[in-house]
Image: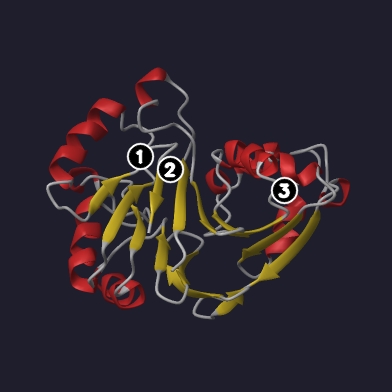
Amino acid sequence: MQDWEVSILGVRGSVPVPSKEFMEYGGNTSCFSVKIENHVIIFDMGTGLTVLGRELIKQKIMRFDILLSHLHIDHLLGLFSFQPLFCPEIEIHLYGRIGLEGDIRKLLSPPWYPLGVEDFSAKIYFHEIEPEKNFYIDKFQVSTIKGNHPDGSILYRLDGDVKSFVYALDCECDKKTFLRLSEFACGSDLMVWDSYFIQEDFKKGWGHSTWKQGIEIVHDADIEHILMAHYNSDYTDAFLHEQEKIACEDKSCIFSKEGMKLGI
């Protein structure tokens, strides 16, 4: 049975927070990776992608796949400093919503950026997908559903022979979404969860959830562990530490910190 190694590279939502009071949990925006033998599947391209890029080059990983939840800028900022883009021997596959290629080409162009997609030496492939459709990356099945988020988002489930991983960031968990997510994530080993708000700060219509809602889904869907992420950029280390003490009374709960690696 293959070990899946989940790496946490970026844990913040909205904007990076590089100040000292955010360093224990981390100040980079969303980026996670799952490594299965020589396969590396990356979720989102927040500023945490910069560190991962250096590691991929060091490990001589020649091909990887990046699944984008959506194109809000905090999930794309790492693209601008992603060193593998300049390596001609590397193959990069980008997956995201319909229109992905055109949107990335607009972003990587003046006046926002001095280089275009054609200026990078890596081999870049775009795969535009519709939510609710399934596809394969090598032998691993990727399932998708729509997230409840302004401008839309895609939630992903990665399945191997006996293991599964769910990525559910940037999704507001109303009653209808709870039922759909619970069915989608049922029986998974690990779910990355949008815990942007605590219950007292929750704002309807912002497209984000709370750690309490995540724990409710874990029990409803028989998920083994939930990894809290996409923390509000106002929540300091001291504040998150207090929330973690309360939330992690439930043994399924893990608060993500940059640099952590988890096996599933």
Name the residue that disc number 1 marks.
Answer: 232
Q: Residue at x 67, y 61 (%)?
A: 94
What's under tag 1, amino acid-wise?
Answer: Asn
Q: Residue 249 in the image: x percent, y percent?
A: 12, 47
The residue under label 2 is 13
Q: Is residue 58 left or right of residue 123?
A: left
Q: Is residue 159 left or right of residue 243?
A: right
Residue at the spot x=58%, y=76% of the render?
Answer: 139
Sooner in the amino-acid sequence: mark 1 or mark 2? 2
Quadrant of the snapshot with the C terminus? bottom left
Q: Position of residue 24 (x, y in %)?
A: 35, 27
**Mark 3 or 1 closer to N-term?**
3
Instruction: Give the vertical position of 93 relative to 111 (above or below).
Output: below
Q: Residue at x 41, y 64 (%)?
A: 165
Q: Earlier in the sequence, mark 3 or mark 2?
A: 2
3D distance between C-alphas at marks 1 and 2: 6 Å
Residue sitting at the far front: 1
Bin the neighbour count of mark 2 within 10 Å (Cα to Cα): few under 14, some 14-19, many 20 and up.
many
- The quarter of the displayed image where residue 222 is located: bottom left
The numbered dot on residue 107 is: 3
